[in-house]
Every structure is written in C-alpha cells, then in structure tokens.
Image (cartoon, rainbow, N blue to C red):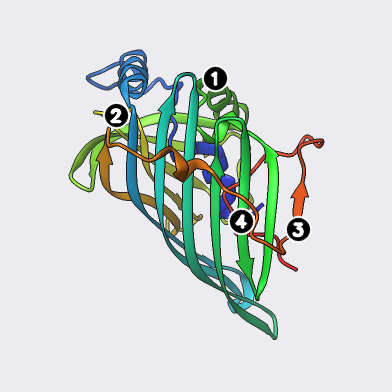
Amino acid sequence: MNVRSRFIALLGVIVVASFVSTTAFAESIEEVEKKLADAHSKLRSYTARLKDVEDIPLAAGDYMKSDTDGTVEWMRKGDMILYRMEIKGTSAQKFGASESKAEQTSTFVSDGEMFYTLGEQLGLKRFIKQNRDSSLTGDFHTMLEMVRKDNDVKLVADDKVDGAECFVVEITPKARPADADPIHKTLAWFRKDIGLSVKVASYNKNQKEIYSHTLLGMKVDVPIDAGRFVLKAPDGVEVTDLTSLDEKPTMTSPPKP
C-alpha cells in the first residue's frame, strides 16, 4: 500500500476520531472527542474538491511523486454512509536508471453495502467489487482501533483549513521509524463545525511535507442525487469480484497491469 492509500485508509476522508493525549489544552481530549462526535452525527451530506500531492525523496536521487485532483460526494442514509470520489492525476517515479510517468483516473463508490472501483491506467480499465469497509466511511470504533494500534496521538494547536476552524492532531508511530522510512509524523485537521477530517499531511525525518490530502470548497448539507452512488461496469469491462475475500478497499489508483 502506498503512502497515499495508507493514510487515507487510516484516517479516511470523512471520519471522526477519538484520541489519547496527556497534553494540556484549554479543552480536554474528552471534550474535543465529544464535540467532534456530536458535530459529525448531525452532518447529513457534503460535496468538496479534493487535492492530493505526494513528493517522496528516496536514496540516491530516487523519488516518487504524484499530483491528483478530484471531487468527493458524501451522504448519510439512515445508518449507512454513501460515498463517491472521482480522481484524475499524474504520477512519476525513479528507481536507479528506471524512470516512469503515468496518468490515471479512478472512480470510487460505496452504496452503503458494497464498494466499487472503476479505474483506468495505461489504457487498461478495471472494475472491482469489494465488501464495504466501514473504516473508510466514518465508522468511529473501527477508526479508533486503527489509530491506537500502532500510533501515539496528541492534540496540537488549532488551525484553519479553507477558512474553517479545526482541531489538529499529531500522529506518530509507537515504534521509532527507521531513518529511511518516508513517514515520521502525520497531522490531521478536523473541522470543529462538522467533525470531519478535511486535511492530512505527512512528514519525513527532516520535517519535509511529503504528502498532503485536502478537501476544499466544501458545501455542507446539500442535496445529492441518489444516482451518484451507483456505479456499474462499462460494457466490455470484466468485473473483479473480491467479496468472497477478506479484502478491504483502499482509495488508490487502480491495479497496475
């Protein structure tokens, strides 16, 4: 799993989280947790623009880079979360004498029961059907377990994203990362008014930002046509059905041929 998928899967783009911290702030961690949970429970829907940037320097001048734009649509329907993300981006990487560049487009849809991916890269289209993964669509308890298992989390100073007030949390691995590991620290911004994660940024050993995922231009509690949360395989595209496997969907580009 690459850096982008690791932290989108870990934090989600639409989750509310609970944190453990001994840092002294005007508000206790329990108060912040309750406020985020209450705000998120009242959120009915949202739309937003998505911006992903990845720039990972490796040893000997090698690197991995990507630049992705997209849109997100999210709607609560009873106890289910409906979700759609469309992305289009470019990637480049260098390993030794080998350099490559690629363009990819992907659509991800959760209809509350299943998770579907339609992707195209290097002219190849893929359609994947998977079991829904609640950790990607706002399940609080699953998210909490994922965060606590391998990371220490604490509150840091409040900040703003796209003009909105946010609580900010710092996430660091419990096991000290090796110097060569790309991620040594991650920050996550949660909007105070809707309890939503609207930005994630990861940093390497030298505190260089190597990855950022941001939601911009958000419109909250807006009507969204239910048809937006339906995705079917185009004619001639074979369906890869992974529902019989214990596979969890991740918000990444489609599998490479």
Between discs 1 and 4, the one toward the N terminus: 4
Label 2, residues with CA under 10 Å away: few <14, some 14-19, many ≥20 = many
Q: Quadrant of residue 39?
A: top left
Q: Quadrant of residue 101?
A: bottom right
Of circles 1 and 2, the one toward us is 2
Label 4, residues with CA under 10 Å away: few <14, some 14-19, many ≥20 = many
Of circles 1 and 3, the one toward us is 3
From the image, tell me which residue sits under label 1.
141
Tell me where residue 220 appears, x and y as whole percent: 26, 36
Cα–Cα gap, marks 1 and 2: 18 Å
Between discs 2 and 4, the one toward the N terminus: 4
Q: Quadrant of the C terminus?
A: bottom right
Instruction: Classify mark 1: helix, strand or loop.
Output: helix
From the image, tell me which residue sits under label 2.
194
Q: Outermost residue, right direction?
A: 244
Which residue occupies 36% across, 33% down? 196
Cα–Cα gap, marks 1 and 4: 28 Å
From this view, report whether residue 35 is shown above or below residue 63.
Answer: above
From the image, tell me which residue sits under label 3.
238
Of the numbered discs in the image, which one, if any, rests on residue 212? none
Specify the amino acid type for callout 1: His
Tell me where residue 114 appears, x and y as whole percent: 63, 35
